[in-house]
Image (spheres, rainbow, N blue to C red):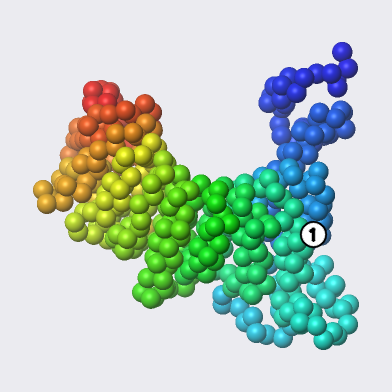
Amino acid sequence: MPTSDLPLELWLEILSYLPRSTLHKMIGINRILFEIALDDIYEEVRFVCDDKDTRKTFKQLRHADISNRVRHLLIRPAFLPGLDEDVNASSATVQDRLSTTFTYMKNLRKLPSKTTIFDESLRDPAYEILDIAKRSIKFCQNLRELTIILRDHALTLSFMSFLNSMWNSDSIGPNLQKLSLETTLVKLPLLLNPLVKCSKQLSHLETFDLNIAVSRFQHTLTERDAAIHALESFLDAFNGTLTSLTISFSLQMVLRPFFEFLPHLPKLKKLELLVIFNVLTLDSPLGEHLAMFIAKHTEHLEHLVIKPHPRQVSLYASDETYSDWLSHDSIPDSAKGFAFPQLILPKLRILDVELRERYRFAGSQSRLLLPNLSGVAPKLTTLALTNVPLSFSRISHIIENL
């Protein structure tokens, strides 16, 4: 039988046993493998640097056969200046420091011009690649997922113009379903406020993954309040479409201001909380606003993930306050009303919890790690427990309380 006559399902089964790199080597065998390989190559586009390969990729996106395969765009602009760099230095100095050799040599060959575009390109060495990306990404009409990673970068006008152009109706905004944002606290208003203004264009956004990263620069209370307001406005603008929300904090700061005013999301089915739980972050009453935020979604929440650490490595750590909140053990009676066991999640089916050992107690293996889950989640079908040794007695107790 000719290889081209093998059904697609059989080829996919064969490829599942082979390393991913093997697929690219088989691209010339037949049309089926050619199409599968192209899907794999262009499924994700990474915009990290300004080099020949990146420019080549963006230019290829103008062909429908290529752009229609793109599902995920990752933006992590290493070419942007840092916050502590002198972005007002002379053009040649900025180009030497920030541009690749390819971009720098092209700019040196340019002749003076009176146009505004040319002036902007001289001030921002990344203007040209950003302009190419802006015009090319519009062709990716099947793009569904966008990841943006911005830490201690200086957000230039050219970059913000590129970023905000994606929310327009003639770009990827109307088809975007998942947005993952990893950034510092101070940048939240700059990144979220334009999304709020374009919320009508982003009518299919269902998943929002927010990761607040640590910055080398201290933020002020005014900047913190602006970030909280921006997050509140964003969730309020998309409360009719969001079904999944992930919040990860790498900072050790009081959680009350963040969760106190966050709106109810009527379609939310999955909630992930990856935060630092200790006496500083869970202020008194213990975890009140965190529990109240979860309680807002009890009628429709189906999947809950709670981890006592952020997604990224942090200098700060959770303490036994987390275990107390999780099982309402060893906490004052006045605070027990806001602990996890007091929640009732009638539609919750999946619970993923990371546990912590109780080292301050003698015989900690006998201490409760979880409450009676039959009362918290009566329809629970999947329970994932991680990061703590489970003795036979602990496993028996958990099973008895399901």
Please tell me which residue is depicted at 63% across the width and 74% down the height of the picture. Answer: 156
Say left or right for 59 vs 339: right
Q: How busy is the neighbourhood of tag 1: few (under 14 within 10 Å), some, or many (20 plus)? A: some
| Amino acid at circle 1 | Arg
Q: 85 above or below 323?
A: below
Of residues 285 and 345, which is closer to you in this image?
345
Based on the displayed image, in which of its 4 quarters is residue 297 positioned? top left
- Residue 176, given in percent of the width and then of the height, sits at 60, 50
Task: Please tell me in which quadrant of the rendered image residue 48 appears.
Answer: bottom right
Q: Quadrant of residue 153?
A: bottom right
Q: Residue at x 77, y 63 (%)?
A: 132
Locate residue 219, reporting x and y percent: 42, 73
Q: Is residue 138 visible?
A: yes
In the picture, measured across the screen, residue 244 lies left or right of residue 100, that is left
Q: Where residue 155 sits: x, y (%)?
A: 60, 72
Label 1 element class: helix
Q: Which residue is mark 1?
A: 55
Q: Is 351 or 245 nearer to us in this picture?
A: 245
Give the residue at the far top of this rendering. Answer: 1
Q: Is residue 72 above or below residue 398?
A: below
